[in-house]
Amino acid sequence: MVETHEFVIAANRLPVRQTDDGWVLSPGGLVTALIPVMKNRSSSWIGWSGEPGVELAPFEHDGLDLDPVTLDQDDFDDYYEGFSNGTIWPLYHSGALSTQYHRHWWEAYRRVNRRFAERAMATTAENGTLWVHDYHLQLVPQLVRDGRPDLRTGFFLHTPFPPAELFQRLPWREQIARGLLGADIVGFQTPDDAQDFLSVCRRMLDTPGTFLDDGQATLEWEGREVTVGAFPISIDMHEIERKAVDPETIAAAADLWVQVGSPKTLLLGVDRLDYTKGIDVRLRALHELLIDGAVDAADVAFIQVATPSRDDVRGYAETRDQVERLVSEINGDFASMGVPVVHYLHQSFSFDELLTMYVAADVMLVTPFRDGMNLVAKEFVAAKLSGRGTLVLSEFAGTAQELTDAFLCNPFDLDGVKRVLLAAMNAPVEEQERRMRAMRERLTNHTVHDWAGKFLRELR
């Protein structure tokens, strides 16, 4: 007999990853937010292990019941790399890369979504709660509604949702919209994303909905109410602060500053190597500031972390080549012997290692062309307990709607990015402290635990 749970999470990936030392918790805001929620009740997490063709039985890790879903190589190629990352990802990021529409990708997406839905229906207790996450599983809510209408089902999209004009290009647009409306609550990162989804519903499904004062709307759909609203995800502010003041972290940050040449200004970028992240924009801006003489190469160092990502997928390999060429140009033109200007790290780092970089850096650059939220920007602010430091932030990151005291820029305007970067580098201490104080107050009052708690209260 299959064990059932009162609270079940369904996400593309499990909250753990396999290492040489066994299973360990994955880093990231979603895992941080939901682990405490899971440990307080009968719960399970449904997800893929990350390895195609590996079949695993349900297992327990650190008090968590985990329920692996198997993806074979065809699933990986067509559902994951194909429809999820070749169709939905670029489309939802405002067409940052031309979107591909293949019928066999769609069939694989339907197949895997049904597999997740069947697992969720089998393992969620009567009248239980199911929380489905992200763009990989947008059909699951309606599939579950059809088979288990007793469940309270929530869906949260971690990426942006596109304007109706873009979404309507999708050949299977109605199926996706209906899939999402199977949930009792459909949550988005920003009010703009929620409004775009409402526009889609009005145009395609004739479901009028008006925003309420709290940024939410209620739709009448198939004889029931569906809540649509913004639930911006956040970070574990208190845990980051605790680690940032640890003497070991402070010492490691001081050592890092020396390792990169003891610069007057240390710039930092931390991104997955993705064509949506705008890494090339910040590199071009710095290069031109060096050429213009507005920045002295002897005074600056730039650490750019570019976590490896989907190198075999169209668009990603080209992005890597472009970024590495720009790094080579800057260092070729301005590095001195043994002291590069740009320290480019195409590697994965633990959160503690990234925190050391946050503490050491003077200026954080977050310049995506489009981003659902971007928690790196929030993590940097949380690490700056002194109030010193500046954040250069794209207007097109969801975070910009909350951290309005950052140095905001339009990543499509290179001259504008240069001006903003220079202003951030030269900001007086009083201005740094004023801006950082306002941003930190926002994050203190809205942590990742507040995010999860609010969503689940609404869902219940």
Image (spheres, grey):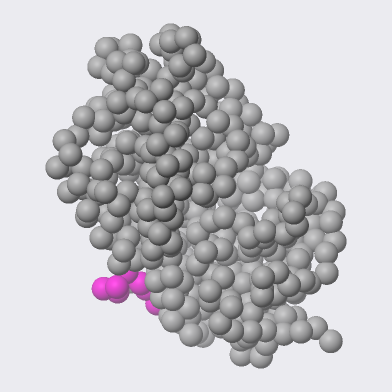
The residue lying at 32 percent from left, 60 percent from top is 443
Q: Nearer the viewer, residue 314 or 460?
A: 460
Position of 422 with respect to 188 (left or right) is left
Can you give x and y, in whole percent of width and height, for residue 418 in the image?
29, 25
The residue lying at 44 percent from left, 76 percent from top is 453
Can you give x and y, in whole percent of width and height, for residue 95 in the image?
50, 40
Can you give x and y, in whole percent of width and height, for residue 256 in the image?
45, 33
Q: Nearer the viewer, residue 271 or 232?
A: 271
The residue lying at 31 percent from left, 20 percent from top is 299
Q: Nearer the viewer, residue 394 or 118?
A: 394
Magenta highlight on residue 216: yes
Residue 173, compared with residue 327, is above or below; it is below
Report the magenta residues as a range. 211-218
- State which quadrant residue 117 falls in: bottom right
Position of 244 with respect to 272 (left or right) is left
The residue lying at 40 percent from left, 31 percent from top is 257
Can you give x and y, in whole percent of width and height, for residue 14 in the image?
67, 62
* Magenta region, main secondary structure: loop
Q: Say whether residue 10 is visible.
A: yes
Position of 107 with respect to 191 (left or right) is right
Magenta highlight on residue 198: no
Residue 101, compared with residue 131, is above or below; it is above
Residue 326, compared with residue 89, is above or below; it is above
